[in-house]
Image (tube, coloured by chain):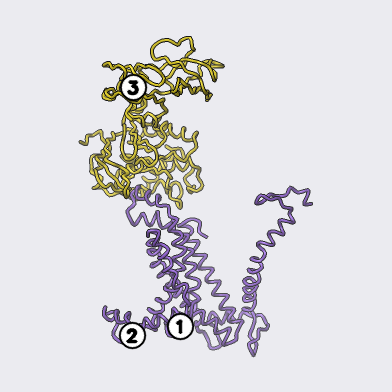
Amino acid sequence: MASNSTAIEVEHLVRRFGDIEALSDVSVTIRKGEFFSLLGPSGCGKTTLLRIIGGLDIPDGGVVRIGGVDAREIVAHKRPVNTVFQSYALFPHMNVSDNIAFGLRMKKVPKPEIQERVKRVMNLVEITSLGDRKPAQLSGGQKQRVALARAVVNEPQVLLLDEPLGALDLKLRKQLQVELLSLQRRLGITFVYVTHDQEEALVMSDRIAVMRAGKIVQMGESESLYEHPQTRYVSQFLGSCNILDATVKQRGTTDAIVDTPAGQLRVEYGLNPPNVAKSDKFTLAIRPEKVTLCGIAEGSGENRIKVRVEELLYVGSETHYLLRAGPQKLTAQAMNVKVGSQGFDIGQEAVAYLPAAGLLLLDD
Amino acid sequence: MANKQKDEVQFGEQLTSRGQFLRSALTSGPGIFWVVFFLLVPLVSIAVISFLSRGMYGEIQRPFTLENFKRFIGFGLFGYDPLYPLIVLRSLVLGAATTILCVLGGLPLAFFIGAMPVRFKNMALTLVLIPFWTNLLIRTYAWQILLAPENPLAKLLVLLHLSSPGEPLYPSAFAIYIGMVCDYLPFLVMPLYASVEKIDWSIAEAAMDLGADGWRVFWHAVLPQVVPGLVAGIILVFIPAMGQFVIPDLLGGAKTVMLGNAIQQQFLQSRDWPFGSAITFLAMTLVMLSLWLYARSAGEKGGDIL
């Protein structure tokens, strides 16, 4: 049901390209004013979903409602949504001001108002001095800002962004992430953001839908998605994860004792569904930063495993340790809090602590 | 001297300035030689000859005079007669009308071929090129046969009440333009098609996303992208179409004199080289001028073209 707080409803959407199902029965509700990300590897259907919402592609089945209205009743060029394209798709023969004014001209907005709104939006995205330039004379970051301004100036109900920062270098991308987010907060427009960059999705989104092969595999707020992935795929795609094959030894109501190649561990179910615990074999996962490396003297106690440091990657603020416990490989990440050596060297014996609450039970 | 200067490295080689000169003379020399001796020299001679006079037996002789140009404008021996300006105008109209017809036919055709599946594209392009590979005279005579009153095309037109029985379809303006478009369409379609293939369709999607309907998407987002190809095609059609006289003669009944005929007459029949040169010179100036004006106005709309 369309309520006042719903911007977009997608129901049972199907899209086929020949034999390939780019979207198979996708349903999702996007709330008004939220920053919603579609995250997945290339070819997972995220761009197809965005294009269908924008009216640039037609679904083979299912319904899209924009602001409660069936999108089939609105022709593409009259939808209250605008898109920021991955390739920017600026009009090469028009200067920056004309590019931005295009949408308003098509809607026959009076000229003085167009001028006023274009000027305001150019101030907003900080390209005030570029009005007379042609797109070919702009840098990547500037093109990106123009593309954004050209969409935002129309004051759409929903802004669709198709990997808008994909072509930019890392530093600029980080800077624009922050700017995009603050722009979204200020304008209050619903953003639907397509990306394959998990970090980008985590930083910017209110909610994320992780997609795989035409389906949404898990959807939720950034934090809950990262802390409580339900499947091995999501855990690997969002951040990195240690994966251990586990066999249930003793099952409790809130926790279980399991055998793993690294030794016996206690697992708290947490938010994860107990149905996983019904089977005898499953996948156990733990984020590298949840693994604590301690000296060999602290070797006894629950969920403590003797390990050997095999490799050590120093990345400035953190150190990544590649560990081995029998046949099991583990990685651990630790902030470099101390000045100087962190106390572990290659070849050294140590103890890894895998907290029971940090261990996740996953579907394959 | 060459040792003192730091030698430039080009194409991964270090060459002395003498070596560099030799190399560029060897590579671009023949081309420059060709243009200078077979284009520039004849053009300059035409310009010079147009200011000279005709001798009793057709020889070119002094004094220098403006008589040829006066005669071209219409001040001849027998009072004012705008014969030559009319011929030029007629040729301009022929060239312009042919160009317009070719654009009207070529634009949809280029997009149609561009939208075809790959395996049909080459076949379609070959079909477009066939007239181009056929001898002009053979093609034109073929049209004479096709347009004859006893053949299907004429009968079809009678059936559609577009002409009366027994009325010949040629010689006529209709026949001329059929021949002209048939001749020049490939010159327009080929460069245009090359532009169509390079269109960035995401720009058209952006225009649609921003609220443009079908026609406005075409006008604002698609057409500007093919302007370079369109301009190239228009130039390739307009210049030769303006000088064309074989097709108007064969399909139009040789009743009218075109620019091409006029020049040919002066050089071959009247043996008046100075006057022939004056016509040639003025006609060329006119073409250049109109192209420049066109490029300038198109340049304002579509960005950098020429």
Dot 1 falls on which chain?
Answer: B
Determine the CA span between mark 1 and mark 2: 19 Å
Residue highlighted by disc 2:
B149
Q: Is residue A116 in sight in this rendering? A: no
Q: Are marks 3 and 1 on the same chain?
A: no
A12 left or right of B63 in image: left
Determine the CA span between mark 2 and mark 3: 94 Å
Q: Position of residue A86 (x, y in %)?
A: 42, 43
Q: Colour of chain A?
A: yellow
Mark 2: which secondary structure?
loop
Residue highlighted by disc 3:
A247
Q: Quadrant of residue A41?
A: top left
The reply to whether discs 1 and 2 touch (Cβ–Cβ < 8 Å) is no
Q: Quadrant of residue B248?
A: bottom left
Pick whichever, A189 or A171, lies toward us.
A171
Q: Are marks 1 and 2 on the same chain?
A: yes
Q: Position of residue A350 (x, y in %)?
A: 49, 15
As drawn, A338 above or below B28: above
